[in-house]
Image (spheres, rainbow, N blue to C red):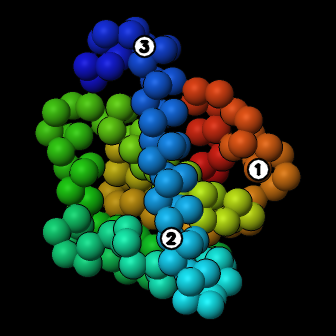
């Protein structure tokens, strides 16, 4: 919020998106290094073999479940503590930007895949729901060359 107040809406959101992308890519690259060091390929199935930046099993959410939706495996996260804080402060729109870290993290790990949100609490859903999809050549180009918040469109 402070960044937006200081820089204005457009420039503030661009800077936040840039910082989130940078942070996510760093996590993804570190995870990739760990997976490769284990002699594994950087595939979606091996992502959790990287230990440095796993989401803690306790404390960040109330419950996680794996579900099938239209033959697609999805992860549902109930009671995200970050979403609760953003709601408490009435900052869901700004807080939602942090969710894009999941896209950046996955594309930093392996640009051929993205982890996207099909639902998020900040967008008004009762839980967050994520799935992994292959990226298109255009999405990889946007992610590599996109300025500011251009790359956020990949979360679909």
Q: Is residue 81 visible?
A: yes
Q: Position of residue 121 (x, y in %)?
A: 34, 51
Q: Upstream in the sequence, badge 3 or badge 2?
A: 3
Q: Upstream in the sequence, badge 2 or badge 1?
A: 2
Q: Which mark is residue 47?
A: none
Query: Mark 1 packing: few (<14 Cα in 10 Å), some, or many (20+)?
Result: some
Q: Given the current orientation, which residue lies at the most extreme bottom position?
A: 39
| Disc 2 target residue | 31
**Residue located 33% across and 57% down the image:** 126
- 140 vs 71, left or right, is right
| Disc 3 target residue | 9
Q: Is residue 106 visible?
A: no
**Residue located 26% across and 59% down the image:** 80
**Residue located 21% across and 40% down the image:** 87
Marks 1 & 3, CB-CB < 8 Å contact: no
Please tell me whether mark 1 or mark 3 is closer to you in this view. 1
Marks 2 & 1, CB-CB < 8 Å contact: no
Marks 3 & 2, CB-CB < 8 Å contact: no
Q: How many marks?
A: 3
Query: Mark 2 packing: few (<14 Cα in 10 Å), some, or many (20+)?
Result: many
Q: Position of residue 70 (x, y in %)?
A: 65, 76
In-front residue for pair 148/29: 29
- 82 vs 50, left or right, is left
């Amino acid at each position: 919020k402070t960044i937006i107040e200081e820089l204005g809406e457009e420039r503030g959101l661009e800077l936040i998106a840039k910082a989130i992308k940078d942070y996510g890519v760093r996590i993804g690259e570190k995870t990739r290094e760990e997976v490769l060091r284990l002699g594994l390929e950087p595939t979606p199935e091996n992502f959790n073999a990287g230990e440095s930046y796993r989401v803690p099993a306790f404390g960040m959410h109330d419950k996680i479940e794996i579900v099938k939706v239209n033959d697609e495996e999805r992860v549902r996260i109930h009671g995200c503590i970050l979403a609760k804080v953003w709601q408490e402060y009435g900052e869901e729109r700004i807080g939602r930007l942090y969710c894009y870290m999941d896209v950046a993290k996955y594309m930093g790990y392996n640009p051929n895949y993205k982890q996207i949100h099909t639902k998020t609490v900040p967008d008004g859903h009762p839980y967050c729901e994520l799935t992994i999809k292959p990226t298109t050549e255009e999405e990889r180009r946007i992610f590599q060359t996109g300025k500011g918040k251009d790359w956020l469109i990949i979360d679909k």
